[in-house]
Amino acid sequence: MLRLIRDVGVDMFDVAWAMNAANLGVALDFVFPVPASNAGDARQSLGHNLYDPIYKHQFGCIADTFVGAGEGADEGAMGRQVCPCIACSPRAPSSPILHSTVDMQSDATSMTGGEATTRYEKPYSRAYIHHLLHTHEMSAHTLLMAHNVAVVSAFLAGVRRVWAETKDEDRSARFAVEVERFSDTYEESGGLFIAAKKDWEYVDKARGKGRLAREREKQEDNQDE
């Protein structure tokens, strides 16, 4: 997308690829422009294949470059933005569902006329979504789609911010520099999505066997190899 913006001037994109990534169990994890804190020798992946067993016991937020609104971090803290998606920033109901006047009488907010406040819960973890994926829970893909769309939205907001903060005569040059920094920071080979598709196919074909049985079979196959 960045090269299409830089070289051709394309200014409209869909997010079909991000939704397809969610179907394969990939949580996107990148930002533009790349913060100085992200600089390093090794290239970073554009996301995480949450089918991978390495995430089985990882209980942190699903993206390294974002934080959840419920984690007590303001936007920009430690170089990370707040991801507003339902996976990273799930919101607790601001008030109970009131089915009748009896419910209204028992609800303190409705009786006092006070305003309900928004309360954010902790983010859903990589381990939790890994579990949902391996047990064929559709909510896993719902959470990942919401997250991936939010990441792409933040990415494009970053593109607009770079253009807005730069003088007209310097705009193209500054944008080109940021595009190169992004290319130097993130791995673009496609290996992430190839591995995710392979893992997705394995779990999908094993539907009905049960997760423990599948994992035992996979371990036995690996030992035989």
Image (tube, grey):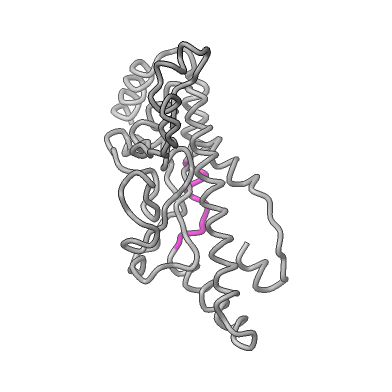
Q: In which quadrant of the rendered view does residue 173 lie? A: bottom right
> What range of the chain is rendered magenta?
186-195
Query: Would you say residue 123 sits in the magenta stretch?
Result: no
Q: Residue at x 37, y 36 (%)?
A: 124
Position above or below: 98 against 121: above
Which picture quadrant has residue 161? bottom right
Q: Height in image: 209 above or below 178?
A: above
Q: Residue shown at 43%/16% (left/top)? A: 105
191 inside magenta stretch: yes
Across and down, in percent, residue 145 comes to 54, 39
Taking the spot 47% from the left edge, 12% from the top edge, the residue there is: 208
Vertical arrangement, residue 180 with respect to residue 114, above or below: below
Quarter of the image that includes the C terminus = top left
Q: Give the residue at the far bottom of this rendering.
A: 169
Q: 209 or 92, which lies in front?
A: 92
Depth order, front residue of 165/222 = 165
Answer left or right for 169 relative to 192. right
Nearest the eye: 15 or 111: 111
> Total label count?
0
> How far across and how far down the image is residue 89, in percent?
42, 42
Identify which residue is drawn at 72% across, 65% down: 10
In the picture, the quarter occupied by the N terminus is bottom right
- Picture coordinates of residue 215 (x, y %)? 34, 22
Residue most extreme to the front: 112
Residue 16: x percent and y percent? Answer: 65, 45
